[in-house]
Image: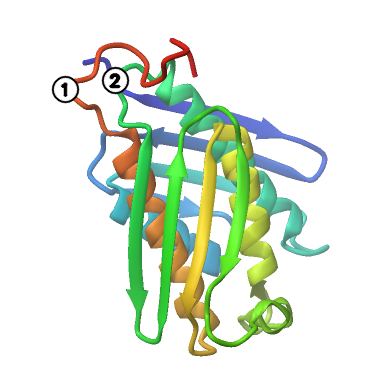
Amino acid sequence: MKKREAKITRKTKETDIIVKLGIDGEGNADVKTGIGFLDHMLTLFAKHGFFDLSVAAKGDLDVDIHHTNEDVGITLGNAFKKALGAKKGIKRFGDSFVPMDGCLVRVVADISNRPSLHVHYKTKRGIENLLANLAIGDNVKYSFVNLEQFAQALIMNAGINMHIEILAFDKDLHHLIEAIFKAMARALDEATQIDKRAKGVPSTKGKL
C-alpha cells in the first residue's frame, strides 16, 4: 500500500507553518509551535493516534496565540486530507471514550467530506459558561475556546464531521483538554484505518 503521508506549508502575514504527517506511523512527534501547551497536546495526539507528526510554526505570539493555534489546525487538517487521498478502503467512522481522572469525554468522527464540529455538554451541571472563562498557563494561556478553534480548523480543512461529548468535568481544564485530544486521536486512528473487507470508497455515492 502506498504510504499515506503529506507535507503542507502555510505562510501568511501572521504565521509560517510546516506540517509533515504520516497516518500509518508509530506515534513519533516533533512539535514546535511556540505554544507550550499545544506542543504537549499535539505530541500526545500523535502518540495515541499512531501518527508520525512534525510541526514547525512561527507566529505573531506577541499579539496572542489565536492565529498560530488556528493556523496549525488548518495546516494539520490539510495534511490529513492530502494524506488520505481518495479515501479508498478506510473505515471512515471512529469512536473513542477517554477518561482523565475526574474528566470523561467521547469523540465520534466521520470522514465524510461534510465537515462540522459539535460540542455537547452532558454533565449534570451546566459548564459551558464555566469553560468559557477558564484558561491554562501563566504567560501563554490556553483556553477551551482555543481548543474549539483548533478542532474547528482541523476538521473543516480535513473534511471531518466530529462530535465531542463532555460527560464529566472536575474543574481541571488541563485534564479535560488532554482527554479530548487523546479521544480525537483515537477516533481518527480508527476512522483512517484500512478495512481489508472494503472495496473502494466507503459510501454508496462512490465518492467522499
Quadrant of the rendered structure where residue 98 is?
bottom left
From what the image shows, is residue 83 above or below residue 48? Answer: above
Label 2 CA crowd tier, 10 Å (few <14, some 14–19, many 20+): some
Residue 184 appears in view:
yes
Distance, label 2 to label 1, CA atoms, is 7 Å
The one nearer the camera, 11 or 150, is 150
Residue 71 relative to residue 112: left or right: right
Quadrant of the rendered structure where residue 51 is?
top left
Residue 83 relative to residue 73: left or right: left
Q: In the rendered image, which residue does mark 2 sit on?
A: 89
Which disc is residue 2 wearing? none
Q: Earlier in the sequence, mark 2 or mark 1?
A: 2
Amino acid residing under circle 1: Lys
Q: Secondary structure at mark 1?
A: loop
Quadrant of the rendered structure where residue 20 is?
top left
Residue at 37% x, 16% y: name it.
201
From what the image shows, is residue 106 above or below residue 89? Answer: below
Residue at 61% x, 36% y: name it.
115
Label 1 CA crowd tier, 10 Å (few <14, some 14–19, many 20+): few
Which disc is residue 196 wearing? 1
